[in-house]
Image (cartoon, rainbow, N blue to C red):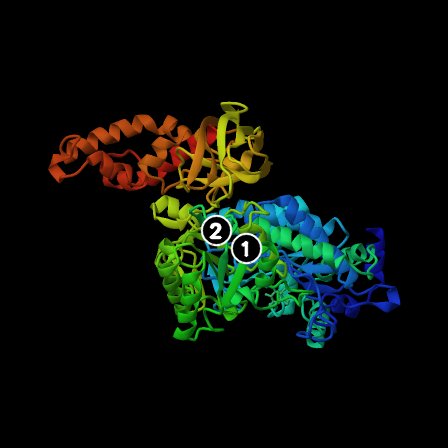
Amino acid sequence: MTKINDLIKKMTLEEKAALCIGASPWTTTPIERLGLPELTVSDGPHGVRRVADVKDLVAASLPATCFPTASCMASTWDVELIHAMGQALAEECIALKVDVILGPGANMKRTPLGGRNFEYYSEDPYLAGQMAASFIAGVQSKGVGTSIKHFATNNQEFQRLTISSEVDERTLREIYLPAFETAIKKAKPWTVMCAYNKLNGTYCSENHRLLVDILKDEWGFEGFVVSDWGAVHDRVASLKGGLDLEMPGPKERRVNAVVEAVCSGALGESVLDESVRRILSIVFKAAETSKGGSFDTAAHHALARRIAAEGMVLLKNNGILPLKEQQHIAVIGRAAEEAHFQGGGSSHINPIQVDNPFKELQKSAGDTELTYAEGYPAGTAFDQELIDRAVEVAHTADVALLYIALPGFKESEGYDRADLDLTPQQVALIKAVTAVQPRTVVILNNGAPVVMSEWIDGTAAVLEAWMMGQAGGGAIADVLYGKVNPSGRLAETYPLKLVDTPAFINFPGGNGEVRYGEGIFIGYRYYDAKEVPVQFSFGYGMSYTTFTYKNPKVSVASFRDVDGLTVSVDVTNTGKVAGKEVVQVYVHDHKSRLVRPPKELKGFTKIELQPGETKTVTLVLDFRAFAYYHPAYQQWITEDGEFAILIGASSSDIRCIQTVTLQSTLELPCLLNRESTLRDWMEDPRGKRVFAPLFQQMTSQMQTAFGGSEGEGAGMDTMGFLMEMPLLGVLHFQEAALLMPPEDLVDGLLAQVNQNK
Ligand code: BGC
């Protein structure tokens, strides 16, 4: 710290300003005079995209391992595996001379149409937070930095550089911030990348509340905030807003603007110094890890294959999988010959090698005859001949494997998806093949949900193989042949149709803003609350074995919020092969003052069990597992009462329920004010104490006036009517009978409430 403070004292104003803007698209400004090195950053998140020439924004990148994209990573529900991937990425960063990898992406999947959803983990903030934290911890354990992105509410590509995400405070706190919050508090990323968009009217790059009040002050983030590439509009405003490093550079104009602002007094030098201090601390930290050398490409390829296999989700299986001794397999679909393994945009990796799915299948298939048919052309063209040929091949085979990949351009940074459909040719192909060959397995390569209701009934099995990384071809074969027992679980809901999705009528917005009208109800929170049937639920995935859950226990039946509790359950593998199960714990609040989702994920773990083996799984639920964010109190609150703890194999497959009683230890300020209704007064214990006598008097007067408790006179329930009236409003009607003005009366009651606190 002294070293940094001394250095800041020695720096000229120009040097400070220059340090806060990149020297090139991928490096910070070195100051040779003071021995300050540059810092090199490279894209991620599922590989190292180290451009050969850092002076070039879009130069070709050096070969690196392309791991599965985030949708697949999250579907592993395996924090240790993600940690291992982080370590492997760090080894590649070191070899490729990269100090900070630009990932992970922790934005929520608000709608399955989001163009970059393949780069993000989940529709659930708890799962996304655990994954992001583990990724960061893995990378940083090797002395390489991360940049968690895109902070915040960057949930679509439509007008991505300018749109304002209009999000209410509770939704922000409960849905869009927690993955960042968890990762930042738990794993301390070296840097945070601010989003392009505006949040409630202010660019994230200038958003003091977001970058300073919440991120730095409330969460204690100690690293530096870097802009997304090109997210800065006004350099001085962004420094004031808490944005430390602008990228990409060089931008002399910006350096000059900062210098001038300090000279004119428009920008306090201490604000600049604070950003300089943050950047310097990371530059020095990065310099502690010496760079260069090589990495174990074979080991990383093997790890990529493991992650891909663990993340693949078996969605349907009538028993056809794992494949047994077949005489003849029809292998249909371009994706068998040309792996579709990553999405478009800044995360695009130059892979070291790419497994060919067909050849990998051959290795596992032994003597089985494999016949290939292309099935569908590249892009979205329609070619009936390819379908006819595929049908011929499928017809005479014992089994058909249909490798279906969404056309590459459909999922990319920069624009959203237009629909959730496979191409018309792919749908026609699946229908035609399944019509002649009921033993058909569909293998999907995509980064986000596709709709299936038109064709799934005809299939024997469906495997979601994601954008599976460079080793995914082998991973598919591992799963099909049972070398790996599938254990991936969906990190997002698969809807039946696009119109069912939570943000459907509020997406993508227009006229410069997108209103998050569905609020806290995204993903399964919405489908559960509205009882909307879905194709596959959040948390769902099949295995080649079966698991039972028994003996659920909670450490205490009644507990204080600050103490939390532990929940345990015995899980047994009741099938014939070893397998992995993801045990999921959701919390349901029986009663709350503000509406809450029917259930929310608050814990999970992945365990491996041999046939017949039982393990006891224990999970901790803390204060936050039971709390919700109350915008009026501006804090996370708990309320006394009963909660159900739901232990299950998916969000719709709850196996055990335990009921517990929470005692809140919070002493919350009284929210009563001049606008509070009679209901508010009577529901607030402190309000009720002072108001109850008056309440009795008022209600009997009103009932007399309106005619009886049923209110026959006015044709209504008088009490129901009254309870929603502000106390002040009711008093206005009774003004003639009052001894003082209604305002004084209410203020007097409020004073008594506040005295009694
Ligand atoms: C993307 C970021 C990326 C950056 C640098 C931006 O367009 O939004 O995710 O890290 O470019 O390539």
Earlier sequence position, callout 2 versus callout 1: 1
Residue 656 at x, y = what percent? 45, 30
- Crowding at label 2, few (<14), some or many (≥20) Cα neighbours within 10 Å? many
Regarding residue 145, the answer to whether it shows in the image is no
Query: Relative to 709, is 380 above or below?
Result: below
Regarding residue 471, the answer to whether it shows in the image is yes
Label ID, residue 557: none
Residue 502 at x, y = what percent? 39, 54
- Crowding at label 1, few (<14), some or many (≥20) Cα neighbours within 10 Å? many
| Mark 2 to mark 1 CA distance (whole Å) | 9 Å
Query: Relative to 81, is 92 above or below?
Result: below
Query: Relative to 537, is 236 above or below?
Result: below
Q: Is residue 721 left or right of residue 144?
A: left
Q: In which quarter of the view is residue 79 placed?
A: top right
Q: Disc 1 marks which residue?
A: 71
Label ID, residue 492: 2
Q: Which residue is outermost to the left?
A: 713
Which element carries disc 1, helix, strand or loop?
helix
Residue 397 at x, y = what percent? 45, 59
